[in-house]
Image (tube, rainbow, N blue to C red):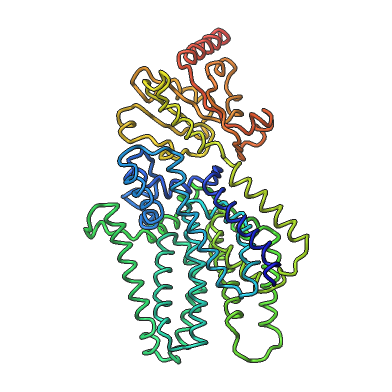
Amino acid sequence: MTPSETRLPRYAYGGLVVLRALFALYGTGYIHPDEYFQNGEVVAGSTLGLHSHLTWEWDPVFPCRSIVPVWLTTGIPFSVLQLLLQGRTPTPSLVFVVERLSFLLSSFLLDFCVYHLVQDSTRLPALLLLASSYVVHTYQVRPFSNSLEAVFVALSLLLLKKLFLVETQSPSSKRTPIYTSLLALVSVCGVFTRLTFATFFFPVALEILKWGLRQSRYSLAGFVRLLSLPILVAITAVLGFVYADSLYFHGDLKPSHIELTPLNFLRYNLLPSNLAEHGLHPRWLHLVVNLPMIATPALLYYVLRAEFDIFASRSGDRDKTKPGIVQMMQHTYNRVRWSATSLLSIQPHQEPRFLTPLLVPMVVVAINNACILRAGRSFLMFWIFGNVILATLFGVLHQGGVIPSLFRVHAIINDTSSALNSRNFEVVYWRTYMPPRHLLAVRQEDVNSQRVSIRDLSGASPTTIVDNLLAPVLDTFPHMVLLVTPFHAVKELEAQTRTCLKELNRVFPHLDLDHIGESVQVGWKDGLSLGIFDVDVACLREAMSTDRLREEITAQ
């Protein structure tokens, strides 16, 4: 392609990079609670002094997550922020941006890997395909452990290709031990980030073993000598993770306090009763629903077509020449996809984000096959339409009011221009995803002194929510009760109860996919809004007394 012909695609890629940054720093869609409770919520208390809520995975009695990936991606940026603020409390929007920034930067490692995994002539189309995927604009720029897992999968594939290149060009190169050692380090980091990384890395590990046998000319002594350094690196990395986790969860290194978090994670997930708490799914869900959702049907068609060509080339007539690096890597991408999809389908708890690490191998296998490069307007139409819809859904709409509502509640609590600032506050969330406490940005001492309380009543019934509003947690007066809930949920309350709620703020948009029917019934504006209400507890108590008196009279 001439410079003039590449100018427009380069501008398009630059525009997609800007769009990725906008989704990362301003996209407040809320995909899953894990994006906050497996990352920022864990370290915000120890670094910024903010009130936070640790979930079951971080229980020192049986920890199932390593602190190292969390500390490296979010703990260090939070610590730097604390130094810059010199002890001042950060605003929730600043905490949000800092938390997202490191994952925005890490997402470009996927671009780097794709750039080097495809052939020189197809690098720009490959980058455009990757950068236009909604997965990059949503999942990859959020603090999911799956986002880091995707980076480690891409890096392992790139290092494997580097190993093949060295084998072909200069087998005795001094770069060989560097690549094998990096592969060992990446594999350990991947497993301690998410144990499921092993399902993606399994075909890569087999290729490394085959490479080692070829390099050692099938000599056991040579094979051991070749892999001794990467094994040593892996052991050292494992010991480092175990040391950091044991020290974090217990504060010492007593034998009874040694923690191997991936093993704990495996033991937890082997119990069906534990998985049932998180939701059980049919084992075909990954293959039939989640994989097409992550790839979108447009890309998946060309992935399957590329895999069919790989299968046909292996089963058809062909000469016995040694396969080239591109062919060897194509086989590896194919095996990675099938290995991860098949092994992860054994577990009955299946979510689309578990398959996000497959995006890079699917993009590369499709681009290397070249059929997708000749795709017509129909592919572009389906690809653009599908990704625009899903990026808008997950990046903006889905539970999109929860995070901005925390920002606005923070503003109400800290409004020094009104008399509200002298009050104590009880914040109740109802019918929303679990609010990440650290994004309310209140200090732990404010919670300990009962100046602020935050509760999550998620799917409670209308009767339960009223009972909880009448039984305040705070015993300090005067205090203000704030109810944060979708407008469709308010409609479920009794008419007299609704008169005790004063709308303070409205957050738009907020899409609750679990209550689509109720949202439609109240109209598009209320159905796509999250409300912040001031609860008049005295009015509510009087309304409930009137209702009970009416029930007694009716019963008589």
**Residue ranking furthest to the right:** 377
For the residue pair 52 and 1, the one nearer the viewer reads as 1
In-image side of 194 versus 131 (left or right): left
Horizontal and vertical percent for residue 162?
Answer: 50, 78
Horizontal and vertical percent for residue 484?
Answer: 51, 29
Horizontal and vertical percent for residue 344?
Answer: 54, 62
Residue 267's image quarter? bottom left
Whether residue 284 appears in this view of the structure is: no
- The quarter of the picture where the N terminus appears is bottom right
Q: Is residue 236 above or below residue 397?
A: below
In-image side of 312 versus 260 (left or right): right
Q: Residue at x 39, y 41 (%)?
A: 53
Q: Residue at x 52, y 53 (%)?
A: 141
Horizontal and vertical percent for residue 186?
Answer: 42, 68
- The quarter of the picture where the C terminus appears is top right
Residue 297's image quarter? bottom right
Q: Residue at x 28, y 57 (%)?
A: 246
Q: Is residue 188 above or below residue 59?
A: below
- Disc tally is 0
**Residue ranking furthest to the front:** 4
Q: Is residue 379 above or below residue 122?
A: above
